[in-house]
Image: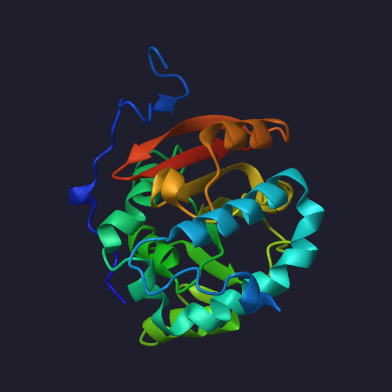
Amino acid sequence: MPGPASRCWLSWVRSSSSCTVWRRGMAGVGGVVLFSGAMSGQARPGPLLRVLGRAVTSAVARFPATWQFLRVPVRRFFDAQATNWDERAGSDPTEYLAPLSTALDHLPITPGRILDIGTGTGAAAIEMAARFADAEIVGIDVSAEMIARARSYTSESPGRPTFLVADAADFEHDEGFDLITMLNMPPFFDRVVVLLAPGGCVVHASSHGARTPFFSPPGVLRSGFSRRGLQTVASGCAGPGTFYIGRRP
């Protein structure tokens, strides 16, 4: 597992033909069968995985109750892919984490409690552990095999981050989190609002922008979180990826 990404490579594209950064307050402003063959050993997401991932993302964003039917096939797919996932998903950690790291650079808070939803093999959680040395960080994923891989990468410092096999749809936390991150994930709007502490932030990032299988357009994220009372802090691009930051009042 590559180590946490350095910040020096970050490229925040303020304006391009495909992405314009918006920042609040700135001037001018059977499961495996379902996904069978979707990766095909490629280092980038293949077209089939993108189509299937987009369908899952759209369903969860529009009709959250559909997740109860989708979670089993999704879990089985990622259990089957866990062993070689890092190699298949892309071996460049700087590119993979670019939108998340850029979003973290623009957080208006210093989080003390962080939840990484859909943590997979733990790349995002490990990056945040290095960045926020005093924070309590929890990474959750429905895939037990992915969580096993994540724990293996942090065996020398067990418990930081803490990795749990859990589903965001029914995960509970007494105090709430100051920061909730979702990297390459469907946006679990309702659960994020429940789990986010007052004044807390949510970061949703897509490593490959619109080419990311589980991609949500910035407009969908702004609209979805706004309807639930969150304020948009910033959105934009980093490398090939995109990010969104929202905050609970």
Left or right, 69 with reference to 155: right
Quadrant containing the C terminus is top right
Residue 18: image quadrant is top left
Report the residue that reaches farthest toward the top. Answer: 28
Closer-to-camera residue (106/226): 226
Is residue 141 depicted above or below 232 in this figure? below
Q: Position of residue 215 (x, y in %)?
A: 52, 48
Q: Position of residue 210 (x, y in %)?
A: 45, 44
Q: Position of residue 152 (x, y in %)?
A: 42, 86
Left or right, 246 with reference to 20: right
Residue 235: image quadrant is top left
Query: What residue do we see at 26% from left, 57% from top?
Result: 94
Quadrant containing the N terminus is bottom left
Q: What number of labels is visible?
A: 0
Residue 5: image quadrant is bottom left
Is residue 9 depicted above or below 131 in this figure? above
Query: What residue do we see at 81% from left, 55% from top?
Result: 65
Is residue 237 depicted above or below 119 in this figure? above
Closer-to-camera residue (80/122): 80
Query: What residue do we see at 45% from left, 19% from top?
Result: 25
Closer-to-camera residue (207/127): 207
Q: Position of residue 147 (x, y in %)?
A: 53, 79
Report the residue that reaches farthest toward the left. Answer: 8
